[in-house]
Image (tube, rainbow, N blue to C red):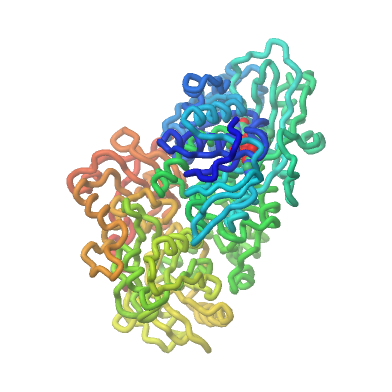
Amino acid sequence: MPSALPTRARAVIIGGGVAGCSVAYHLAKLGWTDIVLLERKQLTSGTTWHAAGLLSQSRASPTLQKLTMYSTDLYEQLEAETGVSTGIKRSGSLFAAISDERAEEVRRLASSVRNNGLDGELLTPSEAKTLYPLLNVDDVKLGYFIPRDGQADPANVALAMAKGARQQGVTIFETVKVTGITQANGRVTGVTTTDGSITADVVVNCAGLWAREVGLMAGAAVPLQACEHFYIVTEPIAGLDRSLPVLRVQEECAYYKEDAGKILLGCFEPIAKPWGAHGIPDDHGFTTLPEDFDHFQPILEMAMHRMPALQTAGIKLFFNGPESFTQDDRFHIGEQPELRGFYVLAGFNSVGIVTSGGAGMALAQWIQDGEPPFDLTDMDVRRNQPFQNTKSYLVARVTETLGLLYADHWPYRQFASARGIRQSPLHERMERLGACFGEATGWERPNWFLPPEARARGETADYRYSWGRQNWFPYAREEHLAIRTGVGFFDMTSFGKLRVEGRDAEAVLQRICANDVAVPVGKIVYTQWLNRKGGVEADVTVTRLSETAFLVITPSMTVPRDLAWLKRTMPEGANCVVTDVTAMEAVIPVMGPKARELLAQVTPADLSNAAFPFGTMQDIELGHTRVRAHRVSYVGELGWEIYASADMARHVFDRIWAAGQPMGLKPCGLHTLDSCRLEKAFRHQGHDMSDQEHVLEAGLGFAVKLDKVQGKFGDFIGRQAVIAKKDTGLDKRLVQFKLSDPEAMLYHHEPIWRDGKRAGYITSGNYGHVLGASIGLGYVTGSLGETNTEILTSSYEIEVAGKRIPATASLKPMYDPEGLRVKA
Ligand SMILES: Cc1cc2nc3c(=O)[nH]c(=O)nc-3n(C[C@H](O)[C@H](O)[C@H](O)COP(=O)(O)OP(=O)(O)OC[C@H]3O[C@@H](n4cnc5c(N)ncnc54)[C@H](O)[C@@H]3O)c2cc1C
């Protein structure tokens, strides 16, 4: 054990759990020296020591599965490298599905898991019984076995990585608590501790349950909250097969692990128990929480039915320990947008052992390169909204999210907790019109509307989830058809609105945008913001409001990330400020072939093509006020997005609603926005594009202006990468697909087969009500041909729940390929 704390390090890692040890190990592997890891108690003394140690690799998300597979392989190799055994045992894992719906979910999972590179086998109930004789399969519908899954000793996994890190020169200090994060000019400069201060270029927050509080030391948000987490261990069971796979019966919230001749039964109960909301006791370390048998009892009862051997086995240990959970069941990784050089890896939602090996590797690479090594968008700490770091919100939300890990992962499933936080001024009106609200970034948004006749029948605006057509399918179809043939409106107040203003605003945006924004006042430009690799950091429209002011419109989900990108890429000394004005305006897109006819009744403005062409904005009169009308469309029809000051939005809406009655103006929800945009093959940032997808591979070369006049801050970011890609050619290409079977449903992650070989997966899917089948977008890899259009000569199938369905492919939008309708 080293004695004196150094005063300087290149990187300081806070926390000696599995996450911190992994980051230290992987940074050292990259050749970093002068790394210090600080642990307030002993290594593993937080959550790591008491994990159940399951190594379940299957994930629908390719990125997550890449991380879990990397971890599992690493833990197998660590003993040879370090001499510390991780206790890894690859005896596989078995899912048992009880309902038909869960069997469908498992079939879909099996398809994507195999596509992500992990083999698994669907089993009949009797095959599952043969594999796991203790399992009662009377009501089991399907089994799913993954032979290469396993289990390990969690503490030893962390200690092996700690040893590996030390062998490469990392210094580890135990019983040293970080008490503060120092900073200057927006950059981290080091830490203060109970034993002195250390200056550092990089500080990494791997403080587990404490990561939120450590984040706050730097003014950075790390939304997570501890919950009590339970398992029991039985007395030894005579003759128990030591090579049993891990068993999961998620509908009964339970997992079972063979544990040295005993059964460890753990649970993910539907209503969790947050713990330590008012602060975690300072002496917490290697501690356990009190038993709560009443809480565990319902799980145990189901388990005794599922595994009758438990009826006679005594309970040797009732374990309760805290683990941190997040608002969306995804962990936090990356550089904090609030402070340069301050990174986080925390909030593992009970899969930190199997994830940390890979996540530590990913974060180390990110720190080294200054950018994510692969698509980590879903877990990126820049997704978090400031309100999500409040205790009140977190306590309410994690009460639900723990249980959701084993609940049905229905398409479109909505959170039930912590709702109603952000509301449009039109909220009550939408409610009265029958809105079924969904939640995104705290915003309540109408996802679909229950029509009056359905309300008269006594139906309610609630989801009835399934993997097939859900209860709202016919209503969304009516909305979709109204947009295509009549007129409908949306409440899109949640759009992020960033005002970029100043003498240098144009030059700043010319550097950030791949399209040309040096346009006349009133012009709207669709553009991507690229990184130096040509990857898509943001997908936005930029409207020129005046000589010195622009409005950036972006999805609500990406606002914190886009703000961070603007801030980080802002040239030194630029006369330009960025303000988030999202809450100032409501947005009412009025869309469809009759949109002009409708709006003409509420405004004296000339809405003709000559006076108000597509891709422009005007300040117009509407009712007793003025609004901004943007002639753009995310659904591919004639229409205007009406931006109304929040205080006058109700007045504006009432005028539009009244005028629209004679022509059947239809309230439309987000599901319709999505189904319409998929027919038009409009991309969605975060699904169809990320910072890893090259703008040319995303098929957005038309929005890149290589020869635009360079502003005073030089070429736009990513220009060289676009030129390089044009030279080397594309490695993959985003393609639109339509299934030949009108019944099958696409959501995301369904494998794409090209000429009988795996070639990618669906990045987003929905039903195309005009095209008459499910529509999906997805990247196709493999040889694309000289002009990248030869890929269309291949034959395609999309795998849905294990069944390969022929699909037609297109590079042009299947609906209105020439884009004439928006210009009608
Ligand atoms: C009952 C249970 C079962 C589980 N089963 C599994 C499983 O089967 N598979 C799986 O993958 N995962 C499982 N997990 C989850 C897994 O244990 C955690 O996700 C993982 O251990 C988290 O690791 P960590 O490094 O992020 O946090 P921790 O292990 O808590 O490490 C954080 C460390 O930071 C230190 N620290 C905090 N603040 C400071 C400070 N100011 N200064 C210095 N040091 C500080 C703490 O002392 C602590 O040691 C389970 C968890 C529980 C509770």
Residue 805 screen position, x and y as percent: 38, 39
Q: Tell which quarter ligand 1 is in.
A: top right
- Is residue 325 visible to the viewer in this orientation of the structure? no
Splitting the image into 4 quarters, where does residue 409 fall? top right
Residue at screen point 47% across, 82% down: 627
In front of the other: 296 or 460: 296
Residue at screen point 39% across, 65% down: 570
Q: Quadrant of the C terminus?
A: bottom left
In front of the other: 491 or 574: 574
Q: Given the current orientation, which residue lies at the most extreme top position?
A: 239
Q: Is residue 681 above or below residue 543?
A: above
Residue at screen point 35% across, 79% down: 522
Q: Decide if residue 433 is on the left or right side of residue 391.
A: left
Residue 12 screen position, x and y as percent: 53, 43
Residue 333 screen position, x and y as percent: 51, 46
Q: Is residue 426 above or below residue 207?
A: below
Q: Is residue 544 above or below residue 98?
A: below
Q: Quadrant of the N terminus?
A: top right
Residue 775 screen position, x and y as percent: 40, 50
- Is residue 771 visible to the viewer in this orientation of the structure? yes
Q: Given the current orientation, which residue lies at the most extreme left position?
A: 786
Total marks in image = 0
In front of the other: 776 or 815: 776
